[in-house]
Image (cartoon, rainbow, N blue to C red):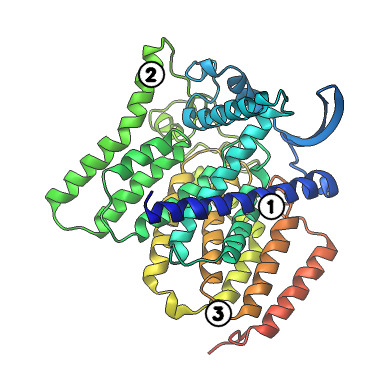
Amino acid sequence: MKQYEKNNFRIFSQLFLILTFFTILSYIFNLYLNQENFYFYYCDEVVNYDINLNGSSLNLNYVFSCDEPKYFYILDNPSLILSAENYYQQRPLYLLSAILIKVTLTGIFSVFQLTIPLVNQLSFLILQILILATQGMVLRKIITNFNNVSVVNNGILSLIIFLNPMNKWSLFQPGHQNLTTLIFIVGVYILQNKRNESLFLPLFIGVMFLFHRSAAILVLVMLLKNILNFESYKKYFTDILKILSNFSVPYLLFRISIFTSGNILNDNQVGEYKQFTWILDFILGKDTIYSGITTGWYCQKIPNFLLCYFIDNIKTIIYLSTIIILILILRKDANLSKLSFDKFRPIILNFLLFYLFWMFIGWYPPVSFSFYSIGNLVIILFTTLFFSMSDRHVKNISLLIYSYYFLFINHWNSPKILEFTIINTVVLVFLFGILFFKSRNFKIFSK
């Protein structure tokens, strides 16, 4: 094994172990000590499971998701993964990964003649941690020299990733929302990487598409990169053809597998929610789902959807307001000599692509889809600024503010969007006061 590959494996293992440790702490804190505040408002809830384990009774708290029966049905019946009975047929590799983890776990425990409590939940939990560790691997490539990061900084990076609300609230669920953050980070990395991409990359994106379909945005990212690195029309259109054809290969193989196995295509995101396809229906004069500005969920009329999306953007900014303020302060303390415009341009361009993409989904539950662009932008900006700072005191306090805010932040499904107790608010104000005092370069009225 080459040294580079050994380093990759070592660092990924570090990240996975650190994130696993954080997961254990989060399980104890959120599902036991802070259970009354770990509230999803609808669909999901913390429940107590009475488990019979080798003749002994065991009570465990865990999150019950209203989506999990659909996921667990396939884990219990893996032969149906390509069947129309599979509600999430369009996420085959995501489900297959969970199935492989479950098979591995049951195989290991069967050797010792032991049964695993909540094996389906545990399989998805391990998959979630693997995704977070992969986020860390790609993010490290963006923010620093890949081979020059200490274990301490790996721990800090893991903490930043772990407390990202999108990761925090989906950790104990079978859903695949945290893949949207990974895909966003990969987009930044593609734009930041100066080398010409190999044909393997669009093929890899095609594989990611079978985990989460928003990976298709990465094709747009590659096309944008080609425009920015334009050399000649011949090369430009040849590259487009190569990108699209290689990206399509995994999905075509998936479609062939469905039909050759005697199954039919099942796409509930389009069939039930009309995600993105509502635009075509609207143009053709077909009925679209529209519930009005007051709910802001289904908003499938032109130009009304723009207002619905804008309202949701405002909610997202409110939800992340404290971290946005923190970023504005850190901009004064960051070593900007290390952060040229070339460092930020890939982040901003990538954000604009993701922002425009999610604008057209036509279904706007509170914060979540806006978070896929605005939220991920905030997280990656904070991470980039944090690791560029040299003042140890400012770094420690800013990390404490970030951690405290996201540790106690409510789920975005709250009707109030953001709920903080007086005590938590006072603590944050106190921490910001210390930050202002320690931040030598910060001036309220800068010239």
Which numbered mark, 2 or 1, is in the foreground of this view? 1
Residue that label 3 marks? 390
Q: Nearer the viewer, residue 149 or 38?
A: 149
Residue 345 seen in render: yes
Please tell me whether mark 1 sits on a helix, a strand or a loop. helix
Question: Which residue is at the front of the view, 145 or 206?
Answer: 145
* Residue 120 appears left or right of 266: right
Determine whether 34 is above or below 214 in the image.
Answer: below
Q: In this view, does 206 lie to the left or right of 60?
A: left
Residue lying farthest to the bottom in this orientation: 447
Residue position marked by numbered label 1 in the rendering: 22
At mark 3, the secondary structure is loop
Q: What residue type is labelled 1?
A: Phe
Helix, strand or loop at mark 2: helix
Distance (Cα) linking label 2 and label 3: 53 Å
- Precedes in sequence: disc 2 or disc 1: 1
Question: From mark 2 to mark 1, how far is it between C-alphas?
Answer: 39 Å
Dot 2 or dot 3, earlier in sequence:
2
* Residue type at numbered disc 2: Ser
Image: 48 above or below 14 = above
Q: Which mark is residue 257?
A: 2
Q: Locate residue 427: give its quadrant.
A: bottom right
Please give the name of the residue rendered at 36% of the width and 69% of the height, measured from the top-left corner. Answer: 342
Q: Is residue 79 left or right of residue 252?
A: right
Q: How crowded is mark 2: few (under 14 residues within 10 Å), some or many (20 or more)?
A: few
The picture places residue 83, in percent across and down from the top left corner, at: 49, 15
Residue 373 visible, this angle: no
For marks 3 and 1 on the same chain, the one whose residue lies earlier in the sequence: 1
Q: Which residue lies furthest to the right in this view?
A: 57
Residue type pointed to by label 3: Ser
